[in-house]
Image (cartoon, rainbow, N blue to C red):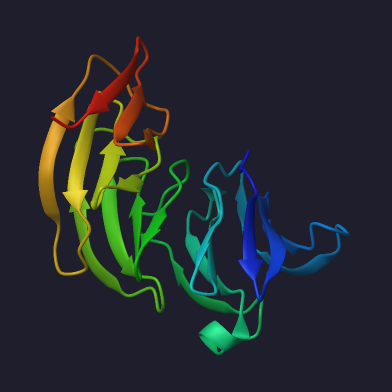
């Protein structure tokens, strides 16, 4: 169920695909597999993400984990396909994590938000939020937005130092779709309505 991601490495496009029990790096022009990483996971939903020569993939159901893998030796010092770190505690199955700067933010399905150092997987902090989460976090205007099944959206200031909550906003019902950000507006779909929210 995971949507593949297309990333650029050394000015070449690479397709990152997470499937049952395996994560693959593929040449999109030829379909040739460049390298792969095996894990115990199935029915994964979160999409692979990448930054600074590092790809991060969620295993899905099974041994729920996040794994960081080198994409670019010049950036990481490790050969492509080499595992850099793995985190198994309070990791997401459905929501796709997000990278802001050198930090990775991951919200577990049951509402535990973790801030990790992208380069080595070190945990900076962890915070439990209310509700369950299927929507993925998004970043815009200097803030992270995280929406839950209670219709609430947490707005936080991304920081490696500590959890910094800006506000919590409530809409009519369950939010499972990832909010969209465009031209100063936030678009949020609940189970009843589609909202466009703008700053005053």
Q: Residue furthest top?
A: 192
Q: Is residue 155 left or right of residue 14?
A: left
State whether residue 109 is above or below residue 54.
Answer: above
Q: Is residue 199 left or right of residue 81?
A: left
State whether residue 137 is above or below residue 149.
Answer: below
Q: Residue at x 68, y 49 (%)?
A: 20
The reply to whether residue 129 is in sight is no
179 or 125, nearer to the observer: 179
The reply to whether residue 56 is in sight is yes
| Residue 114 horizontal/vertical position (percent) | 29, 58
| Residue 154 horizontal/vertical position (percent) | 20, 39
Q: Residue at x 21, y 19 (%)?
A: 171
Q: Residue at x 47, y 41 (%)?
A: 94
Quadrant of the drawing holding the N terminus: top right
| Residue 42 horizontal/vertical position (percent) | 62, 46
Quadrant of the drawing holding the C terminus: top left
């Amino acid at each position: 169920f995971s949507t593949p991601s297309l990333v650029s490495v050394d000015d070449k496009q690479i397709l990152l695909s997470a499937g049952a029990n395996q994560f693959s790096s593929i040449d999109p022009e030829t379909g040739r597999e460049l390298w792969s990483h095996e894990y115990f996971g199935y029915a994964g939903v979160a999409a692979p993400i990448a930054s600074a020569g590092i790809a991060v993939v969620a295993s899905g159901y099974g041994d729920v984990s996040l794994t960081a893998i080198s994409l670019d030796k010049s950036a990481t010092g490790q050969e492509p396909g080499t595992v850099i770190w793995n985190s198994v505690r309070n990791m997401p199955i459905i929501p796709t994590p997000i990278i802001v700067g050198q930090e990775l933010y991951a919200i577990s399905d049951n509402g535990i938000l973790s801030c990790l150092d992208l380069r080595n997987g070190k945990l900076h902090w962890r915070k439990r939020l209310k509700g369950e989460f299927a929507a993925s976090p998004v970043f815009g205007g200097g803030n992270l937005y995280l929406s839950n099944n209670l219709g609430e959206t947490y707005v936080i200031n991304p920081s490696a130092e500590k959890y910094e909550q800006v506000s919590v906003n409530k809409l009519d019902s369950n939010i499972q779709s990832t909010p969209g950000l465009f031209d100063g507006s936030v678009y949020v779909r609940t189970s009843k309505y589609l909202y466009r929210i703008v700053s005053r």
